[in-house]
Image: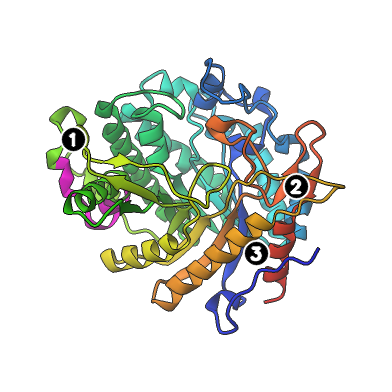
Amino acid sequence: MTVKLTLPAQSEMLSKDFIYGVATASFQIEGGKDLRLPCIWDTFCNTPNKIVDGSNGEIACDHFNRWQDDMKLIDSLGVDAYRLSISWPRVINESGELNQAGVDYYLNILDRLKSNNIKAFVTLYHWDLPQHLEDQGGWLNRETAYKFRSYVDLISKVFGNRVHAYATLNEPFCSAFLGYEVGVHAPGIVGKEFGKKAAHHLLLAHGLAMEVLTKNSPNTLNGIVLNFTPCYPESDSLADINAAAFADDYLNQWYIKPLFDGKYPEIMSQLPTEHQPEIHDGDMTIITHAIDFLGINFYTRAIYRADTDEHFLQIDPPNPRTDMGWEIYPKAFTELLVSLNEKYTLPPVYITENGAAMADKIIDGVVNDQDRVNYYQQHLNAVNDAIEQGVQIKGYFAWSLMDNFEWAEGYLKRFGIVHVDYDTQVRTVKASGLAYKTLITNR
């Protein structure tokens, strides 16, 4: 089975300075539930009809117990970096003090990465809010932003020089919109009056954390990870073009414009007052704290048409699609990166997640996931095209290292470049993983 990923001979992505990595998130792989506080995803999983297959993250990939083998696995792929997230409820007690056992778990991982010369890209919040904070209002409670600052202060001090880069938040859009507006992610709250309030407190938390990281960890790259689903009009009618532009402001620009321009998109004035965030004096100054890098996550685009009842209506995506039902449209990746670079004065960019769920089959111990290899090939080319058009991109992380708990989809969707048998926990590197390794190690 010879499956390859290639890039143009002169590509900057073939230089040794370009960072290649793999990414995971704590709740999706760790398990080890009994040795941490409950989080909002535990509660969500235990709520009937929220997870498609009725599963939970109590064992997941059992990474909590198998981390040493998983470190060998990461090392075997030849990557330069590993993007992992810290479980807030594993490292902070309800009293707000460090839980040393949880801290030691991550110190061991960070030390192992360092000894293997693999850069640690640490995400401080990847959606697993401690449940006791949700009970006090979660991200609808402004105080949660200050609790986050306290957690970041403690953990960044104890991690010391083990970390290469910190991201404050992963995909605040998902936390705010999916969690507090449409309710398909934890904590499952529904209402347009909630989404933008949660988003503002998340961005405030980011700014407060940046102040702490700049002080405690000045030698790391400190930034944030945002996800983007570029918005395209269904037709060239003015109504559809306006609908797509409104969707883009509401779903994408809402999370980046405050970081660089110190304000929300102008569509805010079109939202009912009760749907708008509560902005205090000085908030936007905190939110615009300079960042060392911007992490960008990309999977697909979305197509919109005008609607008489709503500002925009998303239509079903055309083929080809991944197993998530997401259109494969790599051109949107290049166009996104170039447009963001034109719209804002960006710091260096890392592609912190990109990948595809495919309906993998393991046959005779082999996963020949040619469809995923094709997805990676197309999207690596799209990144290269953006670099050639002047976007300063410094690294690329495949999502994901291994199959895992895919949030509301449970274990039904596989994003990994490593296959996981959830009954035996056996890991098998897929064709995509082997191709990725070959690309990285042959630079």
**SS at mark 1 in the image:** loop
**Which residues lie in the magenta part?**
255-268
Whether residue 171 sits left or right of residue 377 in the image: it is left
| x and y percentages locating residue 115 in the rendered image | 73, 59
Q: 49 above or below 432? A: above
Q: Which residue is mark 3?
A: 80
The span from disc 1 to disc 2 (Cα, nearest Å) is: 51 Å
Are the residues at dot 1 and dot 3 in contact (C-beta closer than 8 Å)? no
Q: Quadrant of the C terminus?
A: bottom right
Is residue 367 at all visible to an observer of this figure? Answer: yes
Magenta-span inclusion, residue 38: no
Are the residues at dot 1 and dot 2 in contact (C-beta closer than 8 Å)? no
Q: Residues within 10 Å of mark 2 (few under 14, many from 20)?
A: some
The span from disc 1 to disc 3 (Cα, nearest Å) is: 50 Å
Looking at the picture, which amino acid does disc 3 mark?
Asp
Which residue is depicted at the point 55% across and 65% down?
Answer: 378
Looking at the picture, which amino acid does disc 1 mark?
Thr
**SS at mark 3 in the image:** loop
Q: Which residue is mark 2?
A: 70
Name the N-terminal-most of marks 2 and 3: 2
Is residue 98 at all visible to an observer of this figure? Answer: no
Name the N-terminal-most of marks 1 and 3: 3
| x and y percentages locating residue 317 in the rendered image | 43, 46
Looking at the picture, which amino acid does disc 2 mark?
Asp
> Which mark is on residue 308?
1
User: What secondary structure is the stretch in magenta mostly built from?
Assistant: helix
> Viewer-nearest of labels 1 and 2?
1
> Viewer-nearest of labels 1 and 3?
1
Q: Residues within 10 Å of mark 3 (few under 14, many from 20)?
A: many
> Which mark is on residue 121?
none
Whether residue 258 sits left or right of residue 7 in the image: it is left
